[in-house]
Structures are given as structure tokens and as C-alpha cells.
């Protein structure tokens, strides 16, 4: 907050623009303003100004052939993240297509570029960017993209091929979730069960595992049982459930014909004006 206050005293200073932008991004992360539906302290206008400032500075660094690769990568990354939060995917594509030719190997920047293509409904171009990428998180994202374009067998095989030994819990969860989603749509009960077990090994109470089980019941023809379990799950949630899980469950409630229960789940917890797909 202190950095933000200092930067706001110099709104037209080139040197202070990235400081302002980074301070806004940090505050948005800390206060959950970047989470869709989050009740954070950073407004959409704040994010727009920060994105403009960070993009301008990143482009300036490219123009003057800024020598420090580490700093340049950070400026490009922060600009792309802020632009993504504003839904400005075409600008990310333009910035990173130029920037990636100037920095050393940067998996995060490749991933942000792939996300920019996905944000413009160009998933096959995103797949092309990540083809053969050895970075584990990029491999997981590529597996998810395969599911997006309808290659469910490819998504399942790609996710299963990613070794879990050194993956942090967040990436393990993403991998297992892709396995579960693909298995559901393919009717592969064995892989669905392995995904449920895998997610629960990370967190026994994870809502995603329960939802995979419930959707598996519905796919098996036990729709009444699945609906009863879904309502029971919604009724038993802790008050401090994280927003991502809360929204995931609310979406499933709406999909199963329980809009009122979905609204109750979000009431007082989510700022509906901030819902987005970023």
C-alpha cells in the first residue's frame, strides 16, 4: 500500500508507472480482487490504469533494448498478467510475440501467450505454442487444451504422462482434475476413480473430488442419488470455503436445475459484478 501511495504522487513519471502497476497487482492478489467474484480493494478502473502503465513501460524497455533479461521478463510478465485481468488478450499476444524474441527461455511467458490465444477463441494456436514444452505447468495446460478442442483421449493420456513426483500440490490438483474431467466424458470409471483418489490425497475434503463422484453417479444413471448428494454437499459446506470451490459448486447446482440453491451459496460471499472467466 505504501508503494502505491508513493507512486500515485507521481502519475506522469515513467519511473513510477511500473511501481504503481506492480503495487496494484500485488494488492489485487493479496485481497482476492483478481478472483472472479472477489470482494477486493482494487477496482476495475485501478486494474485498467495499472495495465496501461505496465504495458507502456514494457514496450519502452523493448524499444530501448533493455539489457537485463531478468527484469525485462518480469516487466513483460506483469504487463501480460494485468492485461489478462482486464480481458485484453489481443494486446497480450502483440506484446509477448514481440517480447519472447528478446528474452531467454521463459515458460511463464509462453503460457501467458497461449492463454491469450485461448482468450481469443484460438485454442489450436495455444496448443501450437505449447507443443513439446517440457515445463510441467505448461504440459498440464496443454493437456487441458486438448480437452477443450475435443481430444479427450489425448487430454487424458497427456495428463497421465506428467510425472507427479516433484509437482507442488496445486499442479497435482490440476493434473488430476483434467484426468477426472476427461474420464467423466469418456465414461472411463477406472480413471475417474483414480482422479478422485488423487485429489483426496491432496485434500480429503476437496469439493472437486466430491463433484466428480456426484457427476459420475449421474452418468451411471443414478440421477436422483446424484442430485440428493449434491444438495447435501451444498448444505454441509464450511462458512470459510474458498471462493473457487464455492463457485464451482454453485455452477454445478445451476447445471442440475437448482438455481436458488446456487444463489444462496454465493449470497453475501461473492461480488456478482466482478464475475468473469479470466
Image (spheres, grey):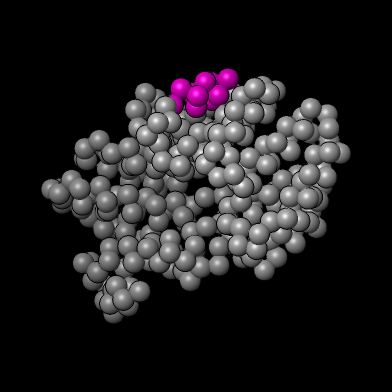
Give 240 or 180, whichever is nearer the viewer.
Answer: 240
The structure residue drawn at horizontal position 39% and vertical position 25%, both measured from the top left corner, is 131
Image quadrant assignment for residue 252: top right
The structure residue drawn at horizontal position 29% and vertical position 72%, both measured from the top left corner, is 3
Outermost residue toward the left in this view: 67
Question: Is 43 situated above or below 230?
Answer: below
Where residue 190 appears, as percent x and y from the top left, is 64, 22
Look at the image and give the residue range highlighted in magenta. 153-162
Q: Is residue 150 visible?
A: no
Question: Is 6 situated above or below 50?
Answer: below
Q: Seen in the image, is 156 located left or right of residue 247?
A: left
Q: Is residue 160 visible?
A: yes
Question: Is 75 situated above or below 195?
Answer: below
Q: How many marks?
A: 0
The structure residue drawn at horizontal position 58% and vertical position 20%, both measured from the top left corner, is 153
Q: Quadrant of the N terminus?
A: bottom left
Q: Seen in the image, is 194 located left or right of residue 9?
A: right
Image quadrant assignment for residue 201: top right
**Residue 247 included in the magenta stretch of the image:** no
The structure residue drawn at horizontal position 52% and vertical position 50%, both measured from the top left corner, is 278
Give 65 or 161, whichever is nearer the viewer.
Answer: 161
Where residue 269 appears, as percent x and y from the top left, is 64, 65
Q: Seen in the image, is 145 located left or right of residue 104?
A: right
Where residue 207 appears, as percent x and y from the top left, is 64, 46
Where residue 147 appears, as percent x and y from the top left, is 57, 28
Outermost residue toward the bottom in this view: 9
Outermost residue toward the right in this view: 224
What kind of secondary structure does the magenta stretch mostly adopt?
Answer: helix
Amino acid at each position: 500500500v505504501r508503494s502505491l501511495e508513493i507512486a500515485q504522487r507521481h502519475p506522469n513519471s515513467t519511473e513510477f508507472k511500473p511501481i504503481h502497476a506492480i503495487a496494484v497487482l500485488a494488492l489485487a492478489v493479496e485481497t482476492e480482487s483478481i478472483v472472479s467474484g472477489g470482494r477486493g480493494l482494487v477496482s476495475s478502473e485501478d486494474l485498467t490504469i495499472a495495465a496501461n502503465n505496465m504495458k507502456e513501460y514494457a514496450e519502452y524497455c523493448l524499444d530501448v533494448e533493455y539489457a537485463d533479461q531478468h527484469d525485462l521478463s518480469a516487466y513483460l510478465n506483469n504487463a501480460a498478467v494485468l492485461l489478462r485481468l482486464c480481458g485484453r488478450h489481443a494486446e497480450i499476444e502483440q506484446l509477448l510475440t514481440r517480447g519472447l524474441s528478446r528474452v531467454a527461455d521463459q515458460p511463464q511467458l509462453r503460457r501467458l501467450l497461449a492463454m491469450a490465444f485461448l482468450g481469443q477463441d484460438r485454442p489450436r494456436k495455444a496448443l501450437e505454442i505449447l507443443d513439446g514444452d517440457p515445463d510441467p505447468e505448461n504440459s498440464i495446460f496443454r493437456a487441458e487444451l486438448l480437452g477443450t478442442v475435443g481430444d479427450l483421449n489425448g487430454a487424458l493420456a497427456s495428463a497421465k504422462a506428467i510425472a507427479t513426483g516433484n509437482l507442488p500440490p496445486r499442479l497435482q490438483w490440476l493434473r488430476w482434475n483434467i484426468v477426472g474431467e476427461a474420464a467423466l466424458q469418456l465414461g472411463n470409471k477406472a480413471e475417474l476413480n483414480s482422479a478422485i483418489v488423487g485429489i483426496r490425497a491432496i485434500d480429503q475434503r476437496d469439493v472437486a473430488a466430491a463433484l466428480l463422484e456426484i457427476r459420475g453417479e449421474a452418468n451411471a444413471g443414478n440421477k436422483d442419488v446424484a442430485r440428493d448428494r449434491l444438495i447435501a454437499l451444498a448444505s454441509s459446506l464450511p462458512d470459510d470455503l474458498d471462493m473457487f470451490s464455492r463457485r464451482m459448486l454453485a455452477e454445478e447446482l445451476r447445471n442440475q436445475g437448482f438455481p436458488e440453491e446456487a444463489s444462496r451459496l454465493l449470497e453475501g460471499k461473492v461480488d456478482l459484478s466482478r464475475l468473469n472467466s479470466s
